[in-house]
Image (spheres, rainbow, N blue to C red):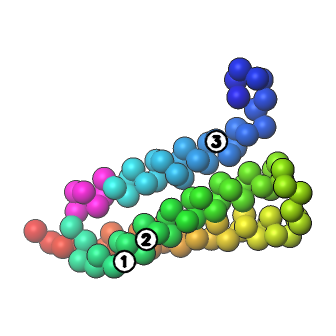
Amino acid sequence: MSGSMDYSMRPIHAHILLVGWLSVFAFGIFYKVYKVRSKMLVAVQGWLAMLGAFGLTFGMWMYSMNPFQWDETLVMILFIVGGSLLLLAFLLFAIITFLIEKE
């Protein structure tokens, strides 16, 4: 972006870094340090986080660039569904933090 002086993808880049990398890093550190009672919830939370991160950033890219000239309503739905999945992943993670095994 800096080399071409085109900063139109800056918000998408920031969300990929924060949601796609930093959040997954924080989840991984938590799951490495603490033992969670329900492994199924951890798996569901992981899938929701990955699908949500991809859906949010893909939807954001489509919303701002729309290179395939898709219908605006479809693009908005992709954006909203991705963000909603990610929100569910964060809420599930908050619930999971209360389900750790005591040492």
Q: Residues within 10 Å of mark 2 (few under 14, many from 20)?
A: many
Q: Which residues are magenta?
A: 29-34
Q: Residue at x 68, y 46 (%)?
A: 12
Per the image, the residue denoted by label 1 is 41
Per the image, label 1 sits on a secondary structure element best described as helix
Q: CA distance from mark 3 to mark 2?
A: 23 Å
Q: Residues within 10 Å of mark 1 (few under 14, many from 20)?
A: some
Q: Residue at x 42, y 75 (%)?
A: 44
Per the image, label 3 sits on a secondary structure element best described as helix
Looking at the figure, which quarter contains the N terminus? top right
Per the image, the residue denoted by label 3 is 13
Mark 3 or mark 2, earlier in chain:
3
Q: What is the x, y in percent for residue 86?
A: 56, 66
Per the image, the residue denoted by label 2 is 45
| Residue 68 visible in the current orientation | yes
**Is residue 69 in the magenta section?**
no
The part of the image, by quadrant, that contains residue 73 is: bottom right
Looking at the figure, which quarter contains the C terminus? bottom left
Left or right of 67, for residue 78: left
Q: What is the x, y in percent for residue 66?
A: 84, 53
The part of the image, by quadrant, that contains residue 55 is: bottom right
Identified by mark 2, the residue type is: Gln
**Is residue 31 in the magenta section?**
yes
**Up-down relation of residue 99 to residue 14 (above or below):** below
Identified by mark 3, the residue type is: His
